Amino acid sequence: MKRSRSYEAKVALLEQEKVHPLAEAIELLKRTATAKFPETAETAIKLGINPAQHQVRGTCPLPHGTGKSVRVLVFARGEKVREAEAAGADYAGGEDLAEKIQKEGWLEFDRVVATPDMMSVVGKLGKILGPRGLMPSPKTNTVTMDVGATVRELKAGMIEFRAERTGIVHAIFGKASFEAEKLQENLVALVRAVIERKPEGTRGRYIQRVSISSTMGPGIRVDEADLLAAAQKKG
């Protein structure tokens, strides 16, 4: 694949296959984020699991958010609609919203929350929401009666993650323009959340490889031992 001069210049800043301490890796990510648009900070975490046997999936409230506004849709009835709206939901309702999605192809939202009694309605939208990663699930705390708390968390920067068929978790952890310390704290929080969802019976090294990058930047290998030590610290 032919790379641009800009990309090659970024790669030149890195030593091939070098493993960087956490703080140094974050600084390199910021230095290689030179696009003309606000780049996202992304990570790829390779897990020592058998994806056919183990599923790693969950949510993580990033301490400093994602740097982007999140449009939240809540499926609920009665008082729960008012609770969702008070918490900052962009849209809240029931069958009317489901019909709008089905008939008009309306998808102007980023996350979906539903109360358990609304899943019979939401379930009919599976073919539309599922492929886009928008289907609410108890595993990600997006099927809940506590819609107010969930909406506030999503608005504050709670992200969802899951291991793909390759055993790799791809997730964002902020904007490259964030202060280095904030990016570091967000990444540590994400890794801690992934560790907390380690499947029972997993043997060997669980976190095998971690790399980070900006949207248009090259991958930067992070020292897993340094990152895990930070994740294991309390407070």
Image (cartoon, rainbow, N blue to C red):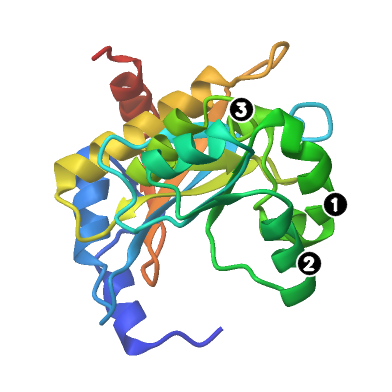
Category of crowding for the residue at label 1, using alpha-carbon neighbours closer than 10 angstroms: few (below 14), some (14–19), many (at least 20):
few
Is tag 1's residue or tag 2's residue first in the polypeptide sequence? Answer: 2
Q: Is residue 202 visible?
A: yes
Residue type, mark 2 in image: Gln
Q: Is residue 57 visible?
A: no
**In the drawing, does residue 234 fall left or right of residue 115?**
left
**Residue 54 position in % (x across, y down):** 76, 27
Residue type, mark 3 in image: Thr
- 3D distance between C-alphas at marks 1 and 2: 9 Å
Location of residue 30 with respect to 92 vertically, above or below? below
- 3D distance between C-alphas at marks 1 and 3: 18 Å
Q: Which residue is mark 2?
A: 102
Residue type, mark 1 in image: Lys
Location of residue 43 with respect to 120 vertically, above or below? below
Q: Residue at x 77, y 62 (%)?
A: 128
Viewer-proximal residue, 55 or 136? Answer: 136
Viewer-proximal residue, 177 or 97? Answer: 97
- The reply to whether dot 3 and dot 2 touch (C-beta < 8 Å) is no
- The reply to whether dot 1 and dot 2 touch (C-beta < 8 Å) is yes
Is tag 3's residue or tag 2's residue first in the polypeptide sequence? Answer: 2
Is tag 1's residue or tag 3's residue first in the polypeptide sequence? Answer: 1
**Residue 39 position in % (x across, y down):** 32, 68
